[in-house]
Amino acid sequence: MTKADIVDRVAEGTGLTKLETEAVVEGFFRTVIEALCQGNGIEIRGFGTYKVKKKAGRYARNPKSGEKVYVDDHFVPVFKFSKDFKGQVNNSMKEKNG
């Protein structure tokens, strides 16, 4: 599913125009990115949690040359699904797959 597909579905469900819906979706994405850039987490009950984690520096291997390279400390955004979300997906997939 693409962003355009999401916009289409939300527009159908809300009665908003696709242009208005796209602005809302873009606004949501921008808000999440800005909050994470400021070091803030976001919790959406029943959906999940966005936060930033620090990854420690380590030695890695270049798969092309096999050479060892050092990767500095860095920060990565992470998303953790809520138990409700995971449960709904699990139950839906069990029903589909028998």
Image: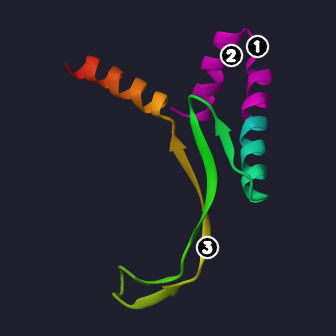
Q: Categorize mark 2 by other alpha carbons within 10 Å: few (<14), some (14-19), many (20+).
A: some
User: What type of secondary structure mainly makes up the magenta span?
Assistant: helix
Q: Is residue 17 magenta?
A: yes
Q: Is residue 25 above or below residue 68?
A: above
Q: Which residue is mark 2?
A: 11
**Where does the C terminus fall, quadrant-wise?**
top left
Mark sitting on residue 16: 1
Identify residue type, mark 3: His
Residue at 64% x, 11% y: name it: 13
Disc with the residue nearer the chain's start (2 vs 3): 2
Measure the C-alpha gap from mark 2 to mark 3. Answer: 38 Å
Q: Secondary structure at mark 3?
A: strand
Q: Is residue 87 left or right of residue 53?
A: left
Q: Is residue 95 left or right of residue 42?
A: left
Q: Secondary structure at mark 2?
A: helix
Magenta range:
1-25
Front one among 84 and 2: 84
Residue at 55% x, 34% y: name it: 2
Q: Is residue 61 above or below residue 27?
A: below
Q: Position of residue 64 (x, y in %)?
A: 36, 81
- Give the quarter of the image for residue 7: top right
Labels 2 & 1 near each other (Cβ < 8 A): yes
Disc with the residue nearer the chain's start (2 vs 1): 2
Measure the C-alpha gap from mark 2 to mark 1. Answer: 5 Å
Q: Which residue is mark 3?
A: 74
Q: Categorize mark 1 by other alpha carbons within 10 Å: few (<14), some (14-19), many (20+).
A: some
Measure the C-alpha gap from mark 1 to mark 3. Answer: 40 Å
Q: Position of residue 90 (x, y in %)?
A: 34, 28
Labels 1 & 3 near each other (Cβ < 8 A): no
Q: Is residue 30 above or below residue 95?
A: below
Q: Which residue, as the protein is rendered here, is positioned at the far left?
A: 98
Identify residue type, mark 1: Leu
